[in-house]
Image (cartoon, rainbow, N blue to C red):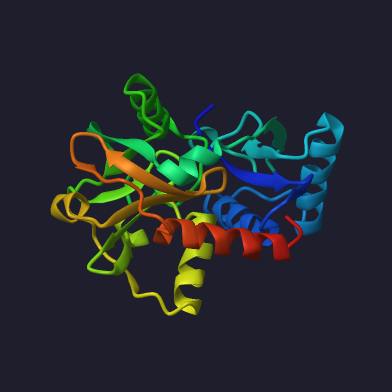
Amino acid sequence: MYGEGVFETLRCYKGRPAFVDRHFKRLKANLNRLEIQIPFDEKGFENILLALCEANKIKEAAVRITISLVGASFGVGRPKEAKVNVSAFCRPVTIDPKNFQNGVKVWPSALLLNDSPATANIKSTSYLIKMLARREAEENNAYETILKNQKGFWVEGSRTNLFILIDQTVITAPLSDGLLSGITREVVLEILKKQNIPHREDQITAAMLKNAEEIFLTGSTSEVMPVCEVMGVWKNKVPVNSLASQLQRQYREKRSLLGG
């Protein structure tokens, strides 16, 4: 009733969820922030996801699991042992291969600001800003909407994290700017470090966005998605063998090692 719940969205490949341990760790941490008891361990979490894909006979899927309180809240005298509700659903996922080759269009929101840094890193069911941003993307025929924070720095998309390449250095906003710590973002940062590709977490200004050499998005359902246009701000043809495409290949290799 009050948005005091959290969720995780994962990709399943060949009927198996990818990066289960990372998603469970984030889910557990977010539930702890809201003082909600998690009703299963990591293996139980994985079993729910496997059973869901099997029951729906979907091999390539996006799976969402939501945990929320039943009829209780901080504000109405939540009992110490409040009951929780667990719901999960999945849907088929297909990504047009042309998107990875040609890139996608992104809408830069001028009306919406991202969530407060104090709560932005909680993947909670209070998702109004992100849903309004997704509507902006749909209205402007864009793949995604990117958002600024209260200080005017670009921080993330409604369902993705934002990366730019400028002066041969990969930059993504620091968590302190107020963004969700995406699982794919985390994996990409590890790949960049392992490959000795120059990178840093830094505030992304309007000028940096405008002068980027490449822009790409990361997310569980988007993987590593190149951008060809930030509408009204930046436009560039995705180069052959772009950094985004290289990272996408390495991301898939890392994912496949886990059975995904």
Picture quarter containing residue 243?
Answer: bottom left
Percent across and percent down for residue 178 are 33, 52
Pick the residue in front: 3 or 211.
211
Residue sitting at the far front: 240
Residue sitting at the far left: 207
| Left or right of residue 201, residue 95 in this image | right
**Quadrant location of the N terminus in the rendered image:** top right
- Disc tally is 0
**Quadrant location of the C terminus in the rendered image:** bottom right
Q: Which residue is pictured at 37% across the width and 60% down the height? A: 175
Q: Is residue 74 visible?
A: no
Q: Which residue is pictured at 66% across the width and 58% down the height? A: 19
Q: Is residue 50 shown above or below 22? A: above
Q: Is residue 70 visible?
A: yes
Percent across and percent down for residue 155 are 31, 50
Picture quarter containing residue 251?
Answer: bottom right
Percent across and percent down for residue 257 are 72, 66
Pick the residue in front: 151 or 231.
231
Percent across and percent down for residue 5 are 57, 39
Q: Which residue is pictured at 33% across the width and 52% down the height? A: 215
Pick the residue in front: 103 or 30.
103
Pick the residue in front: 41 or 69.
41
| Left or right of residue 32, residue 75 in this image | left
Q: Which residue is pictured at 48% across the width and 77% down the height? A: 195
| Left or right of residue 142, residue 236 in this image | left
